[in-house]
Amino acid sequence: MLYQFENRDKSGPLTADSIEALTPFPHIHPHLELIYLLEGSSEAIVDNKNFLIEKGDLFLSFPNQIHSYHDYTPIKGNLIIFT
């Protein structure tokens, strides 16, 4: 599987953002990635396993796991990246 290394060189051990779309291309990084969906639904693909994420769900991707997302509907949520 082809994937991209995502370099998140931001200050501090934690970043938090509001999101309206998730990353569709497979990527990897040395951080934890936590997603909370406020609206919509998406599919998370992690290490070739598929997980449905819907409104009200939390999803956690561990460091150095290849992951990507496929939004089924428009989404809104929060993305937290931390070491």
Image (cartoon, grey):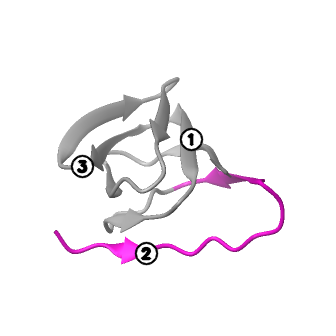
Most foreground residue, 80 or 13: 13
Tell me which label, 3 or 2, sits earlier in the chain: 2
Q: Magenta span has 54? A: no
Query: How dense is the environment of label 2, judged by Cα within 10 Å: few (below 14), some, or many (20 and up)?
Result: few
Return the residue found at the far right. Answer: 12
Marks 3 and 2, how far apart in space? 15 Å
Give the residue pinned by disc 2. 5
Question: Which structural element holds mark 2?
Answer: strand
**Vertical side of 27 occupied by 68: above or below:** above
Three-letter residue code for mark 2: Phe
Give the residue pinned by disc 1. 34
Are circles 1 and 3 on residues that touch, CB within 8 Å? Answer: no
Range of the magenta residues? 1-20
**Vertical side of 75 occupied by 68: above or below:** below
Mark in the foreground, 2 or 1: 2
Q: Residue 22's mark?
A: none
Residue name at image x 75 percent, y 70 percent: 10
Q: Position of residue 47 (x, y in %)?
A: 24, 49
Give the residue pinned by disc 3. 47
Residue name at image x 48 percent, y 57 percent: 21
Mark in the foreground, 1 or 3: 3
Task: Give the quarter of the image for residue 24.
Answer: bottom left
Query: How dense is the environment of label 3, judged by Cα within 10 Å: few (below 14), some, or many (20 and up)?
Result: few
